[in-house]
Amino acid sequence: MTDMPAGPVWVKSERQVERERVRRARARRSASIATASTVVFVVLVVWVVTSSPGWPRVQDTFFNPEHFARALPDVLSGFWLNVKIFLFAEPLILLVGLAVALVRSTRTAALFPVRALATLYVDTFRGVPTLLVIYLVGFGLPALRLQGIPTDLTTLGVIALTLSYGAYVAEVFRSGIDSVHPSQVAAARSLGLSHGKTMRFVVLPQATRRVVPPLLNDFISLQKDTALVSTLGVLEALRQAQIYASGKFNYTAYLVAALLFILLTIPMARFTDYLAERTRRRRGA
């Protein structure tokens, strides 16, 4: 039995090889320049800061290793509460935002009152600072003394964050829904799908993929804003840092809290950038 002749083997041309070599050289040169400039900039900033007259006092007040080690356990325990608040609030915000976006996207005349109420909700809670919403919910709801109103401060903080961020997420979802071309809806309806099935199987899957990066940006902000519930007296990271700073007259605990938030938000930010870049490549941009 004779072997089948091998097919033609594709070989890069000399021009293609040279082009790839030049691209790699440019990439290495750009990376080297970027690294060198970054190192020079960082060294310059460190030199300016550490050579300033007030640096010894600032170092002792904000960058004290001893106070850092002492404050870390309490601030870290409070930070886990920030994470829990974020994990509870995030799915609630997604549900509220999606529901409001769907209501605002309807064109049924009978649902005009509900649509107007959803618009009022978005306009109100996007216009009021999140801190004021936390004050109004945290101190206002318990003052009503109605049966069933929660009195737990953490729960009230989650409710306030959900109301505030739900308005922003609703607009993100609505922009994603509006970005789907009307021909998609027309094609689905021509196939006999109802409005509900069209939204479920055609519009929402496309809209959700498009709004993932902005949604993650909102959730990065949400993770930071969980510190605002400290105004209600919740013993989260910022509150623990405040207690330590007021007792020791040293602000290194705030640095501990800041680093903990950074360690959580930076990976989320890079993941958001990765998804945005992947979306751009899929669109051929």
Image (tube, rainbow, N blue to C red):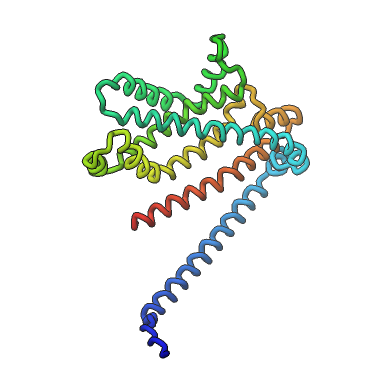
121 relative position to 37: left or right: left
Quadrant location of the C terminus? Answer: bottom left
Which of the 4 image quarters holds residue 20?
bottom left
User: What is the x, y in percent for residue 99?
Assistant: 40, 29
Q: In the orientation shown, which residue stands out farthest toward the front? A: 1
Query: Which residue is found at the position 59% from the left and 43% from the top?
Result: 264
Which of the 4 image quarters holds residue 190?
top left
86 relative position to 2: left or right: right
Query: Which residue is found at the position 44% from the left and 76% from the top?
Result: 21
| Closer to us: 123 or 60 | 123
Query: Which residue is found at the position 38% from the left and 28% from the top?
Result: 100
Which of the 4 image quarters holds residue 204?
top left
Q: Is residue 167 visible?
A: yes
| Closer to us: 57 or 125 | 125
Q: In the orientation shown, which residue stands out farthest toward the bottom? A: 2
Q: Is residue 176 visible?
A: no
User: What is the x, y in percent for residue 118?
Assistant: 36, 24
Q: Is residue 1 above or below residue 218?
A: below
User: What is the x, y in percent for residue 274?
Assistant: 47, 52
Q: Is residue 141 above or below residue 92?
A: above
Q: Is residue 119 above or below residue 90?
A: above
Query: Which residue is found at the position 64% from the left and 47% from the top?
Result: 49
User: What is the x, y in percent for residue 3?
Assistant: 42, 88
26 relative position to 58: left or right: left
| Closer to us: 181 or 189 | 189
Quadrant location of the N terminus? Answer: bottom left
257 relative position to 271: left or right: right
